[in-house]
Amino acid sequence: MTSILVVDDERSMRDFLMILLEKEGYQVQTVDNGTAALHCLENTGFDLVISDIRMPGIGGLDLLHNIKGSYPHLPVILITAFVSPDDAVSAMKDGAFDYISKPFNLAEIKSIIRSATSRIKTEAPGLSAADGFPGIIGKSQEMIKIFDLIQRVGPTPANVIIYGESGTGKELVAQAIHQHSKVAGQPFVPITCSAIPEDLMESELFGHVKGAFTGAINDKAGLFQLANNGTAFLDEIGELTPIIQTKLLRVLQEREIKPVGSTRIERVNVRIIAATNRVLEEEIIAGRFREDLFYRLAVVPIRMPPLRERKGDVPLLVNHFLHKHSKLLGKEVQEISSYGLQVLMDYDFPGNVRELENIIERGVALENSNIILPESLTLSSYRSEQRNKSETEPLFQAVANKEELFERGLEEVINDLEKRIIYFALEKSNHSKMRAAELLHISFRSLRYKIKKYGIEDN
């Protein structure tokens, strides 16, 4: 679903554009000033910005200038009630997609928005960047920074350490760095440190010769021999024992290894990319990780954000996984319903991108139609129960004890409960009144009346 940020200091115009755009199927968020707009852009990915020009503080032209400086591919449409040729020329020079004067023709603005959003499909930085980084999908600012880092560090021989929770795509980033390196045609050899028994780790890393230990019936090349002149990816580097850490440090310092049971020193030329879901600085303080090894590994640190910190990428990832698994499973599931997508947008994804792919794969497998409905989405039951419990218990628990009920009266207590429910619906819908009304099964006009009645702030 295409997401649009509307910026206007007039509440009536914000509400009008929200109603218009949501009816057209867009996901809309509104703010009343340029500062709030920039804050939203820092935290959420949007596909289009529609902004008034004349606003207190940061006006539309200044906002446009800021956006183009930080998000050059993000289309911006400017609207104004004060037609000025100079403003129009300035806006177009600064990169505005279009400039519309109020009152505007509905068909015209719909057409302009369609043109702007259709361009997103071919020019959005996340889509084009993702094409150059197989498997890495994203257009949020967090991911754009990672794409940029990969391009800059890839051609260098610098060692890299990638931080991130399980399922965030650390190995995909490691592969992308290798593909952008000068040794892209050489081996990329991954190893998961936690998956190798402690007594076999030295052999797995450095190899062994025949007879080195019981069961060593032949010579065996280790990770560094296999990755010679290429890249070695050490996943879960924080699991290495102190002895192996010491031996690894020697490899980094001397560029040489000695296979287990051998007296022969072998030269190796290997770039190391490490990954961990631990905070290695804390491991150093606790004495579980060598500080000198850390500085050798962490020449360039990269942090992979968890999916809950880049929710703007969820629709893009959903679309990617839908097409991938529809093809693999021989199904014709082409899209997800708006309510199904909202379920995912409200979920924290403890398993990150890997969990999202699993949810979509399962949804495609279970769905009998060509669109995934909410009932085909299976979220982590524990997390879902905890989230539902934390959200609903404070809302629907008694709003008054027996004594208070008789003192305040039934009408006041019911009004209090209704006010809380409206607050809850607005939070669930990201303060979209149209969506909140749908959640509550009441008309938009009724919701507007109740918001005014209870003095609920318009966020």
Image (cartoon, rainbow, N blue to C red):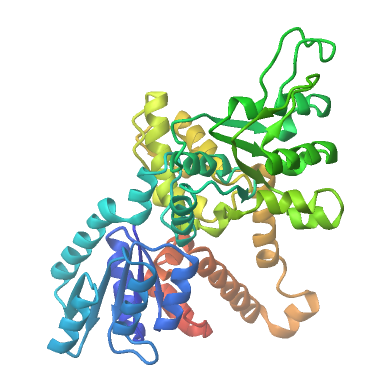
Residue sticking out furthest to the right: 287
The residue shown at (55%, 59%) is 309
Residue 424 position (above or below residue 349):
below
The residue shown at (45%, 58%) is 312
Residue sticking out furthest to the top: 217
Q: Quadrant of residue 270?
A: top right
Q: Quadrant of residue 94?
A: bottom left
Q: Nearer the viewer, residue 280 or 449?
A: 280
**Residue 362 location in percent, x, y?**
51, 33
The residue shown at (74%, 85%) is 407
Residue 245 position (above or below residue 313):
above
Q: Nearer the viewer, residue 224 or 280?
A: 224
| Quadrant in which the N terminus appears | bottom left
The residue shown at (74%, 19%) is 208
Q: Is residue 345 left or right of residue 11?
A: right
Q: Nearer the viewer, residue 246 or 178?
A: 246
**Residue 188 location in percent, x, y?**
53, 32
Q: Nearer the viewer, residue 254 or 26?
A: 254
**Residue 214 location in percent, x, y?**
85, 11
